[in-house]
Amino acid sequence: MIRLQSHLRAVLALLALCGPMAACAEQTAHSITQFSAAPETPTGPLSSDMARNVQVVFVDSLERSVWGPDQQVALNDIALSGDPRLAWIIADMMRFTWRQSFDDGLAAAAATLLNLEYDDHRRWHHITDHLIAWDIPAPPDYLRVKRAIFTQFVPGWDRIFVEGDIDWRHVSWGGVLIDDRPFGTTDDVCNCIPAADNPQVTTAQQATWLDDDDIVFGIEINGEARAYPRQIMEVREMINDTLGGRDLGIPYCTLCGAAQAYFTDRIPGVQRPVLRTSGLLSRSNKVMYDLNTYSVFDTFLGHAVTGPLADKGVQLEQATVITTDWGTWKTEHPTTTVLAEYLALGRDFNFRDGRDKNGPIFPVGDVDPRLPIQEDIIGVTTPKGTPVAFPRGAALLALQAGDPVQFEDVQLVLSAGGLRAIGPQGQDMGSHQAFWFAWSQFHPTTRLWGADN
């Protein structure tokens, strides 16, 4: 029998070699795959025998910390069931395997169910990409089984995996543990990605550690400006801050090239949400949650999808984040503050130009082909509710040439070396920069400036 009790330590040790939110086996360039026709998928409940097989393989084996003949026989029956829905559970289990023979068996079972020849070096990625692209339905009782798998490895997820307005098929492990440290914690020693709460800041003149060409994410609220260096955000990925008299939650998804800012105050009947990184991903986008209620948010869209905040219909308002260089930001905002150097924890990651430079390293399924996967866009939702993406490079050239960049009643303007969107009365529209694949995944009906106007 294979003992499973040291599984998480083994997996974490492997992933530690690759950096946060990364699995070594997944560091391969993404290409737009031409997906074949999806396999036929049955509907309705599982037979009692198949439901028992699922229980034996994916629940009992973990709860009892064993993998023996009963589990192998049950897995073989699952592989021969002709029900591709069950491949979702297999893919979930594959995310946590650390023993080659175990992974081999799971991958072979998924391939049989999907009639798929997978890339052996990217097997989990390849299998999951197809499941997403084909939109294979989840099997009956899917959330219960998935929850049993994930919480066996990370007990802190027991309050995360609950019913809600979230497609749990697309949620996978990012390679780190949940950040469930209390608000204001200063001890950053953890296997999580540690958020910074009420971070220390300095003046621009004191920030001698920053070079003028270093990338920063600039935010200005009620006349108060602050720079969030990418070097720090690569390490923290989440800041809970107060700026211009407003509370903010600022997630940065390294995988999506997107820093966003959400107002976390003035929500009637709701204590200020404290945003944290769950350690989970949805189509290569970080999954954030509120530490107070364990309500999960759609990070890209800013609305609560599970828990008490979803029941209240909480939708966070977005503020503009300008991606620019430090030299230009401090010149145009001479009184700006900037996060203190120590918040980088002595690290100098540059995932964008290193680990992530060749495309998504986690499954995303189909990709909108209208732009290259990682083209930078400025995304915004118009007052009419229309999501629109402006290719950053083309928009910059147009504005520098004196040409307008506008869609419906939203226009882009140059701002501190970056771009921001304003409405018909010049009001801030809460825009931010992101990779095209991410924006189009979470805004599948997005319009594209230059093509749709």
Image (cartoon, rainbow, N blue to C red):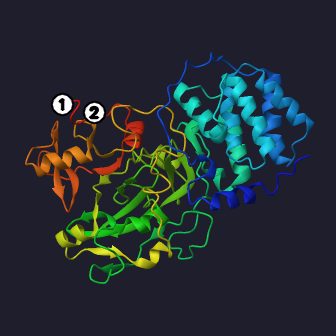
Please tell me whether mark 2 sits on a helix, a strand or a loop: strand
Is any part of residue 48 visible from this angle? yes
Please tell me whether mark 1 sits on a helix, a strand or a loop: loop
Horizontal side of 368 relative to 51 (left or right) equals: left
Marks 2 & 1, CB-CB < 8 Å contact: yes
Q: Position of residue 291 (x, y in %)?
A: 53, 60
Residue closest to the far left: 402
Three-letter amino acid code at disc 1?
A: Asn
User: Upstream in the sequence, badge 2 or badge 1?
Assistant: 2
Residue, x 17% and y 36% (percent of image)? 408
Three-letter amino acid code at disc 2?
A: Arg
Q: Position of residue 37 (x, y in %)?
A: 55, 18
Q: Nearer the viewer, residue 384 or 311?
A: 384
Q: Which image quarter: residue 332? A: bottom left
Q: Height in image: 132 above or below 21?
A: above
Q: Nearer the viewer, residue 7 or 103?
A: 103
* Spatial CA span between label 2 and label 1: 9 Å
Q: Which image quarter: residue 214? A: bottom left
Q: On residue 312, which mark appears?
A: none
Q: Quadrant of the C terminus?
A: top left
Q: Height in image: 371 above or below 235?
A: above
Residue at numbered disc 1: 453
Residue, x 18% and y 59% (percent of image)? 415
Q: Position of residue 200 (x, y in %)?
A: 40, 78
Residue, x 56% and y 59% (percent of image)? 20
Is any part of residue 244 visible from this angle? no
Density class for disc 2 (Cα within 10 Å; few <14, some 14-19, many ≥20) is: some
Q: On residue 447, which mark appears?
A: 2
Horizontal side of 128 relative to 411 (left or right) equals: right
